[in-house]
Amino acid sequence: MDTIIGIGELGIIKNPGDRLITYALASCVAVTFYCQEPKVAGMIHVALPRKPDHIKDLRRPGYYAATGLPILMKALVSEYGCDLSRTRIHMIGGASSVRGRDVFNIGQRNTKQIKKILNSRGLGFNTDDLGGTLSRTVELELSKGEINICYHLMAV
């Protein structure tokens, strides 16, 4: 079964035929976790590095790296028994605007925040596909633990 991870969402799969899929990764960043034993995978689609102070209601904690990533990692460990130090971690996305006027540098800021969170827990990532000016669709197939990335031109 396919589980679609929307912007600000996170998900975990554990059935062999399942896939995690997220679309439209431009400045957003997907972080995937693949745990071989037990066979479990998780994904988050991060839109921003951290929640602004003026926002009190947190309906989608996955929208922010600083809140969503710890939630996903905690669930993988406590609910599914994953050892994150033995988990394959991938980061995909973080593109810049095609117009060259990306004054907020959201993609770079997302990437920096995610790396900071992983590093604070003694974790690195196995591969990344970050930056550039292309949007990405990402699929993680649980049975093989493989990441598939499709690239798309961003609208101007």
Image (cartoon, rainbow, N blue to C red):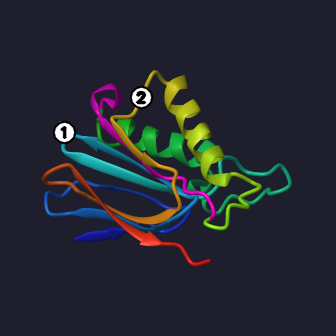
Q: Residue at x 27, y 43 (%)?
A: 34
In the picture, measured across the screen, residue 108 lies left or right of residue 75, that is right
Does dot 2 land on a helix, a strand or a loop?
loop
Q: Residue at x 53, y 61 (%)?
A: 133
Q: Residue at x 60, y 38 (%)?
A: 112
Q: Nearer the viewer, residue 23 or 73?
A: 23
Which mark sits nearer the N-terminus, 1 or 2? 1
Q: CA distance from mark 1 to mark 2?
A: 17 Å
In the picture, measured across the screen, residue 74 lies left or right of residue 21, that is right
Does dot 1 land on a helix, a strand or a loop?
loop
> What amino acid type should be assigned to the residue bearing mark 1?
Gln
Q: Which residues are magenta?
A: 83-97
Residue tagged by mark 1? 36
Residue 61 placement (x, y as % from top left) = 60, 55
Quadrant occupied by the N terminus: bottom left
Residue 18 placement (x, y as % from top left) = 21, 63
Q: Nearer the viewer, residue 86 or 58?
A: 86
Please tell me whether residue 16 belongs to the stretch shown in magenta. Answer: no
Residue 94 versus residue 126 in the image, above or below: below
- Circle 1 or circle 2, nearest the eye: 2
Residue tagged by mark 2? 124
Residue 46 versus residue 1 in the image, above or below: above
Residue 28: numbered disc: none
Residue 128 placement (x, y as % from top left) = 40, 43
**Would you identify the image quadrant in which residue 113 lies?**
top right
In the picture, measured across the screen, residue 48 lies left or right of residue 90, that is right
Q: Residue at x 55, y 24 (%)?
A: 120
Q: Nearer the viewer, residue 96 or 99?
A: 99
